[in-house]
Image (tube, coloured by chain):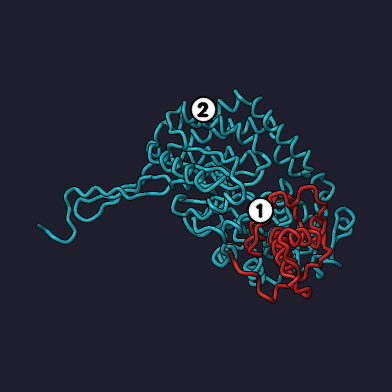
Chain colours: A cyan, B red
Amino acid sequence: MNDPAIDQLLSAARAALRAAPPVGDEAYLRFARSVGALVRHRWSEIVRANEVDLAAGHGRGLPEPLLHRMRLTGAHRDRVAELAGTVQRELVAATRPGPVFQGLGGATARQVPRPLGVVLMIYEARPTVTVDGTLLPVCAGNAVLLRGGTEIAATNAALGAVFDTALAESGLPAGLVQVLTDVDRAGLRHLLRRDDAIDVLIPRGSPSLVDACRISSRIPMIVGGGGVNHQYVHRSADPDLAVRLVLDGKLPEPEGCTALEMVLLDDAVADAFLDRLARRVAEPDVARLALRVDTTLADRLPAGLRAGLDVRPLTDADDGREFLDTTLAVRTVSGLEQAVAHIDRYGSGHTEGIVTGDPRVADEFCRRVDAAALVVNGSVRLHDGPTLGLGTEIVIATGRLHVRGPVTLRSLTTRSWRVEGNGVTRFRAA
Amino acid sequence: MSTVQPEAATGATGDRVLAAVKRVVVRESRLSLDPATVPDDEPLDGRLLRVTSLGLLGMLIRLEDDLDATLPDDIFAGREIHTVADLADLVRAATQAGPS
């Protein structure tokens, strides 16, 4: 796509944003309802497009994990319907004006929601992101440009047609959603330079993709970084609880960004922890665990653990590593000080947990560790918008500005102050 | 475009393409180690590195930035790439930039 064509799509996005009704308008509820119904109604058409992409991917020799992520199933259809329903339920509360503040004289002020503006979503070959990345930003009043992996161009085109119909049915302007199926890498670079026309950039994908956006663009970013997450087990911890939390943190969906990567064990509790873990190796999912243990633990591992699990020595490369599989690193530390130092050096600021029976230690951990979420005596998997009752999310942000943690409908708006002056002046009485 | 990497990161070979490739595959594999310590024959998807085609878009943009070059969209089409050196050879051929 050449530069004039990109100028044109950016102009269309801005025009649609200007023409769109205010945040909280019922048209956005209609849009969510319409997307849910249309995806159900046109599912066979969407799947046919998806099969075209999959066949092309097979032909190009794409690896099976990538094809798996590209493939749409009935579960995805049901999930879209569920997401559309959730967005409708949450939208009113998420876009409600804030409380009224009493100012000078009779003046009052309250925050009212506004869209972030034109949002550019860049992601890889994941059609589910096309749906999430449309529903939430648009229902929060934004215009959205979606540039997904070229491997899912046909699927995205079919979903784009759904969005076009949903916009028309709900009375929202055409151009509020644009699925970019013909923007090549040069075109993408051009988009990344257009901080004059794009208000927010949301990259969702590999570290290189996020780096590329960070380096090549001045557009403000909401970024969900990878999670190099730790669970610190203090000497005062109940070892049974610690094992339960560690297993929950690692074993379901270990490729998720809230998955646990390393356990930091106080040396005083290490033997008890390993003993309790050894008692559970017969459980089918626990048997899939692969441990990477430091040298201080190598000779202390219970025989059952050594026999039941894939156990290897920890290497320097394992510190700060996001394994994305069932591998769990285990390292001993001398205490809180060393645990905090390790997390400070290797953590990614995503989710950090502590297991302790001492509230003062929990307070000290939370005071000193800097991450989007700190979990005390719970699974690191609790860091999730719906699980915490914060609302549905599109990503967990690790940046420091605007939003940190789950990016919900509310996070996809900004706030203006509406001031009711009631004739009050500030400096001159008359 | 960003400038080519500092000399210290180029490794023993002095090959700026190889150094750029090592930096990007280390980052893509979410590792916290010195890229220069990665062997040239390290598999891209093995015990140490975890590089798959899922991250190609970002890696190509990063390599273009690092090397101040434009890489073809079909750079990987029909190619067998198993190691860091394989990837560096491919990028070197595409940029026609030999070892410095």
Q: Quadrant of the N terminus of chain B?
A: bottom right
Query: Which residue is the site of mark 2?
Result: A165
Residue depicted at 44% across the width and 53% down the height: A196
Q: Position of residue A143 (x, y in %)?
A: 46, 41
Q: Residue at x 54, y 30 (%)?
A: A35
Say if residue A416 shows up in the picture: yes
Locate residue A384 relative to residue B82 in the image: left or right: left
Viewer-nearest of discs 1 and 2: 2
Query: How would you rate the neighbour count of disc 2 (Cα within 10 Å): few for under 14, some for 14-19, many for 20 or more?
Result: some
* Mark 1 vs 2, N-terminal side: 2
Identify the secondary structure beneath mark 1.
loop
Residue furthest left in the image: A430
- Mark identifier at residue A65: none
Q: CA distance from mark 1 to mark 2?
A: 32 Å
Relative depth, front residue between A339 and A256:
A256
The reply to whether dot 1 and dot 2 touch (C-beta < 8 Å) is no
Q: Which residue is mark 1?
A: A206
In the image shown, does B14 or A130 lie closer to the viewer?
B14
In the displayed structure image, the side of residue A77 where residue A288 appears, left or right: right
Residue for point 73% across, 50% down: B53
Quadrant for residue B40, please give it.
Answer: bottom right
- The answer to whether tags 1 and 2 share a subunit is yes
- Image x and y of residue A15, in percent: 41, 40
| Quadrant housing residue A13 | top left
Q: Compared to A73, does A119 lie above or below? A: below
